[in-house]
Image (tube, rainbow, N blue to C red):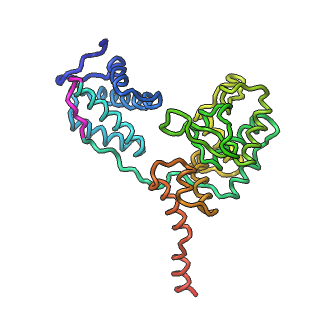
Amino acid sequence: MNALQISNQSLQAITPGLFDSFISYLDVSPKTVETYSKALKQFNKWIIAQGITRPSRADILSYKEYLKREHKPATVQLYLIAIRQFFKWAEQEGFYKNIAENIKGAKIDREHKKDALTSGQVKDILDTIDTQDIIGKRDYAIIALAVTGGARTIEIERANVEDIRAAGDNTVLYIQGKGREEKTEYIKLAKPVEKAIRAYLRARGNTKPQEPLFASHSDRNTGDRLTTRSISRLVKNSFIKAGYDSDRLTAHSLRHTAGTLNLLKGGTLEETQQLLRHSKLDTTMIYLHHLERANNKSEERIASAIFN
């Protein structure tokens, strides 16, 4: 191994060679490699800044407190998972003691961090998009797909032209969901959504089956697959243009809107779970709790008793 040797006496850095060996052992997805790489680089930077050459469990706890001051709970959780996995592997390989064993992550509030939109707000946003040009046609189709099918930005990024298929008597878009290796799930394309996607594809001209369903149309990278960052940005810009500018409104708000509107319009909890592709019903229950609270008339009853 062309990496700095690790022992119970010193750990000066998690070098590229050591990191590669760790990742090869885990056999994880490219996205996880990216997350772990970022987390361990951050840890490296911290231990070097602290002058630590032999990290202890107390150092991991101090680092956890540092993360909590600098990052959101979800980020702290991801970084600590990477560190726990690394030291677990290091001990198994005889490199270093597992000083991160049983270190708890940050407490994550399961309530939604982003707001949903009302049906009227969604209409405003769609009506504001100029669909006379190809970019407008694309942006309209993306937002329509996300808000009716609860599509995540990663699912939109991964979609290819050939993924539009038939299932029974429905036109559907097969997607590679979060944590999935293959495109085994699908979103049913409501007629207006299918119409919008096909209008966009016609504007693109001849497309090959393996090409991205949604592509860039900038001068620099025309035809390239849109990244999740680009998708988030174009959705956010559409919100702002329609007059809905809030830190709590992002591309993920469209997914929340899909779940909320489905329940409001009579969809069952199980149907909403299937729509949003939640592995656990508890996750879907959060939407129901929000609606139950919104429909709770307690404040009005109390006010009526006092002021009337």
Residue closest to the eye, 303 or 227:
227
Q: Residue furthest right?
A: 132
The answer to which image quadrant residue 56 occupies is top left
On screen, residue 244 versus residue 284, left or right, reads right
Position of 105 with respect to 113 (left or right) is left
Q: Position of residue 144 (x, y in %)?
A: 69, 46
Please give the range of residues in magenta.
Answer: 93-101
In the picture as drawn, the residue positioned furthest to the front comes out as: 168
Whole-percent x, y for residue 57 in the image: 21, 36
Q: Residue at x 82, y 39 (%)?
A: 132
The spot of residue 168 in percent (x, y) is 67, 45
Q: 173 or 24, which is in the foreground?
A: 173
Q: What is the x, y in percent for residue 275?
A: 58, 50
222 left or right of 307 in image: right
| Residue at left offset 29%, top offset 13% | 1
Q: Residue at x 71, y 25 (%)?
A: 208
> Relative to 256, does residue 96 appear above or below in the rendering?
above
Most frequent secondary structure within the magenta stretch: loop
